[in-house]
Amino acid sequence: MNEIILLKLGELVLKGLNRRTFEEKLMSNARRRLHSYGSFQVTTKQSITYVEPQSDDCDMDGAFEAMKRVFGAVGVCRCRACAKDKEVMLTTIREFLAPQLAAAGTFKVECKRSDKAFPLNSIQLAQYLGGELDDLYPHLTADMHHPDLTVYVEVRDDAAFVHGNTEPGAGGLPVGMGGRAVSLLSGGIDSPVASWMMAKRGLCLEMVHFFSYPYTSEEAKQKVLDLAKILTPWTGRLVVHVVPFTAIQEELRRSCPEELFTILMRRFMMRISAEVARRTGAGCLVTGESLGQVASQTMEAMQCTGAVTSLPVFRPVVGMDKEEIIRISRRIDTFETSILPYEDCCTVFTPKHPKLRPTVAECEAAEEKLDVDAMVKDAADHIERIHISVE
Ligand code: ATP
Ligand code: MG
């Protein structure tokens, strides 16, 4: 157990009196994510969360990768523990950071001493270690401002800890800090990215998927569950609420003007999602809509879909180009699954000429002959809930 993982906390440390709540949330999220890698102790001191293995059989590689996906940490690094002796520290630096020391051209040493009984103060220790490293590695030059490698040494009560540059963490805010949201997850590229972006801002997600069997296949549903699974290292475990949507689509096709089909269908999606929000205690909806991408994503269409609920609707990719959305989807590994060629319920019965600028009045007129509340309730009452655990 001579290695630990450090999480450097991001903007959450700025949250004043809420800071402790943020830290607690980050720690409990980290603890849950660590379960499958062994037994760890997680504590926070001065904007740093310490993840310490409690036995030798902990999977440190797995734990490190998992910690890079915990929202709230801006940086993550592995760190080696050693005896509080300046020569042992030097040997530890040389062993543990060998690849980084070989690759760097410039370096500096930063020390922090929380054990005030240690005979050298931080500056003296940094001077000693920096001087030795400078002598031992002729290719390295000291640079206090923009070094390639910063060697960190922290002298704590129990041991000294050595680490090199920090790797980027997931950023954002701990999942759960912002409350609960219902996210509409299709099998496409945009909605997994939108979900990920809102989880990053601290929302705990309930996923809703509209399923139109037999017009869309079991494979299409499985693809959505696979996408949810890919998101779980960031979001934590998820419930996918699979809504039977066929009856509503068939009813709309039977009784409504074709040019309004898509927008009316999307109004039902929003109503049912709002009902799921009510039942799960969620306070907002999330969609992957992007302005102007398709007919149902014009400003007017969004007014029509937003009009059926008083909940805020977050559309984090609304101002992004497809290329920008794809870049994120590649980074979070959803892209390859998103492009698998299965039908989505949105492509079933798509009108040839959907109305680009529908009005709320038109939608309401078209819906007059429908028993909207009963249709929503019936769909919501027949939801299949699928639990997705973290990978
Ligand atoms: P995506 O790549 O997310 O599928 P898209 O460009 O295909 O987006 P649409 O199909 O018009 O866009 O859907 C817009 C948004 O509506 C989606 O991002 C998603 O939030 C929601 N949505 C669409 N179809 C479904 C579905 N079958 N189940 C749940 N939500 C859906
Ligand atoms: Mg879609």
Image (cartoon, rainbow, N blue to C red):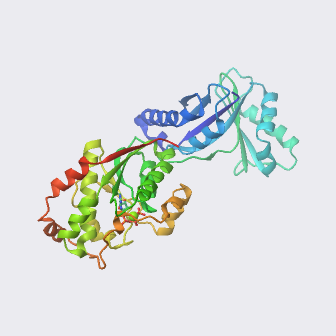
Of all residues shown, which one is farthest toward the bottom?
Answer: 353
Q: Residue at x 59, y 44 (%)?
A: 75
Q: Which residue is more in the foreground, 211 or 149?
A: 211
Q: Position of residue 118 (x, y in %)?
A: 71, 22
Q: Is residue 117 left or right of residue 178?
A: right
**Residue at coordinates 86% horizontally, 45% vertically from top-left?**
137
* Residue 318 appears in the rendering: no
- Residue 88 percent across, percent down from the top left: 80, 28
Question: Residue at the front extreme?
Answer: 214
Image height of 335 relative to 236, above or below = below
State which image quarter holds ligand 2. Answer: bottom left
Residue under the point 12% across and 65% down? 368
Vertically, is 217 above or below 380? below
From where the camera sits, is residue 374 visible?
Answer: yes
Q: Which of the image's four quarters has the N terminus?
A: top right
Q: Is residue 374 left or right of residue 227?
A: left
134 in relation to 378, above or below: above
Q: x, y (%) of residue 346?
A: 34, 66
Quarter holding residue 132: top right
Quarter of the view holding residue 305 = bottom left
The furthest residue to the left: 369
Q: Is residue 294 left or right of residue 155?
A: left
Give how far across and how far down residue 308 sits, in percent: 21, 59
